[in-house]
Amino acid sequence: ARERGRRPTPHRERLGSDMGEVAVAVDAFREQFDAGIASLTPDIATLATTWKRQQRVNELCDRLCALVPAHVWCDALLDAGERLFERGQHELARRACFARVAGANLLDDSDERWKRAKEDRARGVGPTDRRRMHVLALFGRARCDGAMDAADDPHVRHPQTLERAKRALANLREATQEAYRGDESLYWLVHNGTVHIHAACERLMRNGHSRHAIESLMFAVACLESHILLAVPRYLDWRVTLASEVCACYDDVGDCDAHARAFIAKCVEHVDDLKRLEALDPVPQTLEIQTLYERADRRFRALNARYDETSTTDASAVTAEMEATANAPGDKARFLSALLAMEPDARTVRHAPPTNPAVKAAMEATTEWLAPLVRSMTVGLEHARAVRIAADALRERRAAQAEAGVSGRETGAEPAARDDGSVANDDDEEEKPDKAPPDESPPAGEGDAPRPDPTEPPPDLEPEAKEAYEAAVAELPLSLHDALMRRAFCYQSWETFKGLHDLATLRLVEMGASLGGGDGNEKEESYDADALALAHAAAVLKAVRVLEGGEEFPEPEPEP
């Protein structure tokens, strides 16, 4: 072309008119990309020996950008960036994919590339599609920055790391605002932005920088409240969760109760506005929507109670507020757990008596409320354990009898003839009642009580005890059992902690028995996440308590 005096046609323009060739180029890129990242794993992301493989992947991205139109390679690189992020290749994902798409000038409607694509009636190049790709690129770039910082300084100890974390939060807010400015159909991007913001803020809160997370969390709550497609009952749970995190930040900063009360009041006001709008709908609310509203109301009442000095400085007042708040099993435990989370030190493995009067009253109310629940669950679980032990003993006895019978037939003499000339057979033996194996223990004295039969199961529980056990299980699911046990340890309520720890041991033992036993690895795979969290917390806190010279935790006696 140069020899003939014509300007060479760029590849992207030549392939732009033939979408079949574009599709072939994208498929070839994806195939080569899959092969290129197959050996890239998180553990080698920063090794010098990985540089050549990473460079090959980067060159693949360069080649794709030279072959296909911009809106096509932007979409393909976003998918590639997510796959690199999942494999722990954060720097490569940022440099080769997300940063490239973020700098593609996607929001400029005057760009000739978008005008030409519009004239060619290309799909996926409208303003909404370009805004979607731009926001996803901004999200990806900020997430990569946060992941690299977390790997370099997981506890945010260096001032530079904190500044970069604040800058990443600002970038996430900016990206969420871009999604908010776009078409309503991009509401899911606004929601995803609040999720990314919460993840970044959680890292700051966990490492003592809660004051820098408040603004971003409040921004996330405002996004959910103001977007017409997010200010609906479906997202109430997530909105209340973010509001709870704002209150936790206020608690960490200290002396912010007035700000927390004002923030909660504003959140409740927005929910009440939503209820009034729902009431205008002639179609009655479904049971699911009513449940969402009731759950949000209960959680907001629990948050209000944390900062209401008139109702939380006395255990009886806390109990009354708890009873008024609870409408479903588990509500009481959630209410108490929310109150006990007020002091920042309670979120670490340290323990000291509560200094806040509200927390002290909440701990007393928790102890009073848990005592009958722990007793009822202990009775039910110990009864189930006794039934299981008796069943196992009976099974072992029958197995021993069967083994003895087989051994006798193999080594014994010929069957003896009866007086009538017939021969005794095995069927006659089966008609005889089971006989227990001889007891080798010394005979009991005249004053000794006879030994109980280990195969005899205990009598059934009384109906009241059974109902109390079932109600206690519903009131204290495993996740709340774990949370309250941690709080009791942190606030040195040792009697409550001991009861919850022993109850946790019983619950986990019975869960393991119901799952069929197995070795430790098999049991861990069978347990759900809540059961594993409870098991780990019980083991760690017990070890800490014993090492500090606290009360002993006797091991359970071996089963007969």
Image (cartoon, rainbow, N blue to C red):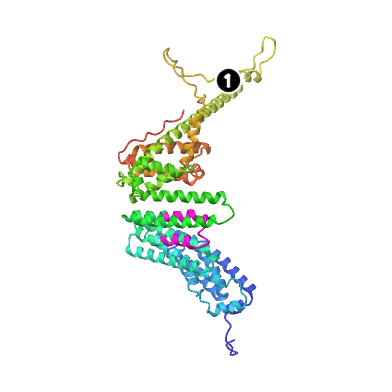
- The residue lying at 59 percent from left, 55 percent from top is 282
Q: Looking at the magenta stretch, what is its main secondary structure? A: helix
- The residue lying at 63 percent from left, 20 percent from top is 430
Q: Which quarter of the figure has residue 68?
A: bottom right
Question: Could you say where residue 43 lies in the image, as x and y percent from the top left?
Answer: 44, 59
Q: Which quarter of the figure has residue 32?
A: bottom right
545 vs 426, left or right, is left
Nearest to the observer: residue 119 or residue 514: 119
Magenta region: which residues? 218-243
Is 427 part of what is drawn in magenta? no
Residue at the disc numbered 1: 434
Nearest to the observer: residue 213 or residue 406: 213
Up-down: is 103 above or below 187?
Answer: below
Nearest to the observer: residue 528 or residue 21: 528
Is 228 part of what is drawn in magenta? yes
Up-down: is 114 above or below 524?
Answer: below
As helix, strand or loop, the secondary structure at mark 1 comes to loop
